[in-house]
Amino acid sequence: MDGNGRWAKQQGKYRIFGHQHGVQSVREITEGCAELGVEYLTLYAFSTENWNRPKLEVNALMTLLVKTIRKETKTLMKNNIRLDTIGDRDQLPDDCRAELEEAIETTSGNNRMTLILALSYSSKWDIVNAVKSIARRVKSGELDPENIDEHIISNTLTTGKYPHPDLMIRTSGEHRISNFLLWELAYSEFYFTNVLWPDFRREHLYEAIREYQKRERRFGKTSEQVSNG
């Protein structure tokens, strides 16, 4: 969800103004995905690198996050959407973590769609922690190193209980993935748009999905193999 700061600058406002308006895009895209039958939506909300931003902006973002979670829980319940997170929750402020955990518990029984917030998340952080966890299992004798495969690595990541993404959308014209789901995006389709996140609406989501539907996903096979099933 990129472009909040640039959007605010275009309006002659502080960066937090862009983050505030980005909340409407979150609401609209979440509801739009649920209406389309999307089962999992992951939003890259705050990376571990984002902690290096000016303290004033980080504090404002955390305050906004608390208010948004508190306000939107009713909307999630109304739309039968379950909330979850990936990332280092321990790094979040206590009030933010408490609101988040309460919303996760409240929505845990919903099954229409799962909304996953990547908070204090980076893929490198996740991979490093997974490697450490696997190493401990090897050291304890629980796991034979020869048995380590893709499934064990995938299941040890914080994303282990979710399928890998079919489509990754990045807004604002940037053409990089910025330490997001490096392992999980191995065979995902990428879609880049110049639209800044606060302006991203259902019609932009639909456009991205229409483009995705034109793609041939071969997963290393030839077109003929895919056509023949």
Image (cartoon, rainbow, N blue to C red):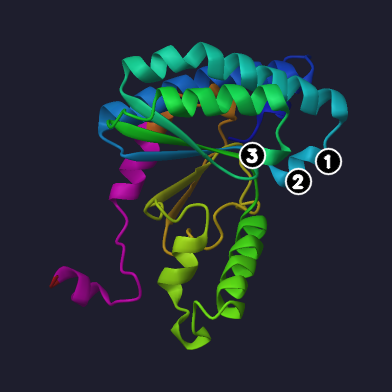
Q: Please state the horizontal and vertical placement of residue 51, each as a whole percent of the image.
A: 79, 39
Indicate yes or no whether the magenta region holds residue 177: no
Seen at 16% across and 69% down, the residue is 227
**Front one among 222 and 76:** 76
User: What residue is pinned by disc 2?
Assistant: 49
Q: Which residues are magenta?
A: 206-227
Circle 3 SS class? helix
Q: Nearer the viewer, residue 207 or 27?
A: 27
Task: Tell me if residue 149 comes above or below residue 187 in the rendering.
Answer: below
Q: Residue at x 76, y 22 (%)?
A: 15
Instruction: State the residue position of label 1.
Output: 52
Circle 2 SS class: helix
Percent of width and height locating residue 45: 60, 35
Label 1–label 2 contact, CB within 8 A:
yes
Is 16 on the left-hand or right-hand side of 45? right
Report the residue that reaches farthest toward the front. 140
- Pointer 1 or 3: first along the chain: 1
Is residue 221 inside the magenta stretch?
yes
**Residue at point 73%, 28% (across, down):** 93
Amino acid type at image mark 1 = Asn
- CB atoms at circles 2 and 3 under 8 Å apart? no
Establish if 154 lies above or below 52.
below
Q: Position of residue 61 (x, y in %)?
A: 71, 24
Per the image, label 1 sits on a secondary structure element best described as helix
Image coordinates of residue 205 in percent, x first then y, are 40, 33
> Closest to the observer: 91 or 166?
91
Query: Which amino acid does the dot numbered 3 rest on?
Result: Arg
Q: CA distance from mark 1 to mark 3?
A: 17 Å
User: Which residue is identified by label 3?
Assistant: 89
